[in-house]
Image (cartoon, helix red, strand yellow):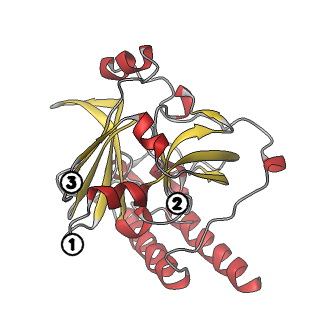
Amino acid sequence: MRGPLHRRRFLSGLAAASTLPLSGCFDPLVANDSQVRGVLASANDLTYRAQRLLLGSDDLAREFSPTEIRQPMRPNGSTNPQDEPYLALARQDFASYRLSITGAVQRPLSLSLVDLQAMPARSQITRHDCVEGWSCIAEWTGTPLGLVLDRAGVAPSARYVVFLCFDTLANGFAGPIRYYESIDLLDARHPQTILAYGMNGTALPVANGAPLRVRVERQLGYKMAKYVRAIVVTDSLVAYGEGKGGFWEDRGYDWFAGI
C-alpha cells in the first residue's frame, strides 16, 4: 500500500505546484506570454509525464463508501445556464436532448438520455477536487465514455476528445464564448471516465450540470465539463477556442490538471 500512496502524494504535489498560482483571479504573472506562465507550463508537462509513468492506464482514483458522503455536492462555475437552447431543453425536462458524437469517428452518433441510460452504467463515489482548494465526495452514475467511443468507432488518427457545452461564460468579438474542455484518449477510455446523468441516487441537478456532465476522476474539477451538448473526436485542439484545450486553459490554467 505504501507504493501507491506515495505515488499519489507525489502526483498531487506536482499538480498543486502547477496550479496554485491560478486558483483565484488571473493577473499578469500568469499571462500566456509571461515567464511564470512558461514555468507553470513546464510543471504541468512534468505532472502529465509523471502520471503516465507512475500510474497504469487503468489505475483507479480512490472510491469511497456511502457513509463518507457528508454534504451535498457543491455547485461551482455555471450553475444555471440562461442560453435559450438550454432553457428550451430544461423546460421539457431534457426529453428532446441529443448528444452528438462527431469528428474522427466512423459512425457519427446522436444519442438521447434514454439511449445513454440504456447502455451499461457505472456508479462511483469519488472526491471532486477543485483548483480553488475545496473538495466534496459524491456518487456519480453514468455511461462509460469508452463505450460511447467504441460505438462511434474512433479513427486511428484521433488523439483527443473535446466536450462542447451549452453554457456561455463570456462574450467575444465573434459572439458568445461557451465552455469547452478536452482530454486525451487514454483518459477518455479510463474505467472511471463517465458521462454522468445521476448524482447521489437522483437525476443530475441543473446546478451540477444536467442533463450530462463528464467525470474524469484523476483530474481537477475544471476538466469535468458540465451541460455537455456535443463530443468531437479529433487529432488536434487548434480549432477549438484559442487552441489550448479548454475555456480556462485559454485563460491560463494548465491543460492536464492531473492529481
Q: Quadrant of the N terminus?
A: bottom right
Real-space CA distance between mark 2 and mark 3, rounded to the nearest whole angstrom: 29 Å
Identify the image quadrant of residue 158.
bottom left
Inspect this view and state whether residue 254 appears. no
Residue at position x 55%, y 83% from top? Answer: 54
Is 149 left or right of 197, judged from the image as shown?
left
Task: Give the CA distance from mark 3 to mark 1.
Answer: 14 Å
Secondary structure under tag 2 reads loop
Identify residue for label 3. 107
Horizontal side of residue 102 vs 196, given as left or right: left
Residue 114 in percent (x, y) is at 44, 35
Which is nearer the N-term, disc 2 or disc 1? Answer: 1
Please name the amino acid that badge 2 sits on: Gln
Label 3: state its secondary structure.
loop
Examine the rendered structure and indicate whether residue 54 appears above or below residue 121. Answer: below
Residue under label 1, please give it.
Answer: 156
Horizontal and vertical percent position of residue 189: 43, 65
Q: CA distance from mark 2 to mark 1?
A: 25 Å
Q: Nearer the viewer, mark 2 or mark 1?
A: 1
For mark 1, give the secondary structure. Answer: loop
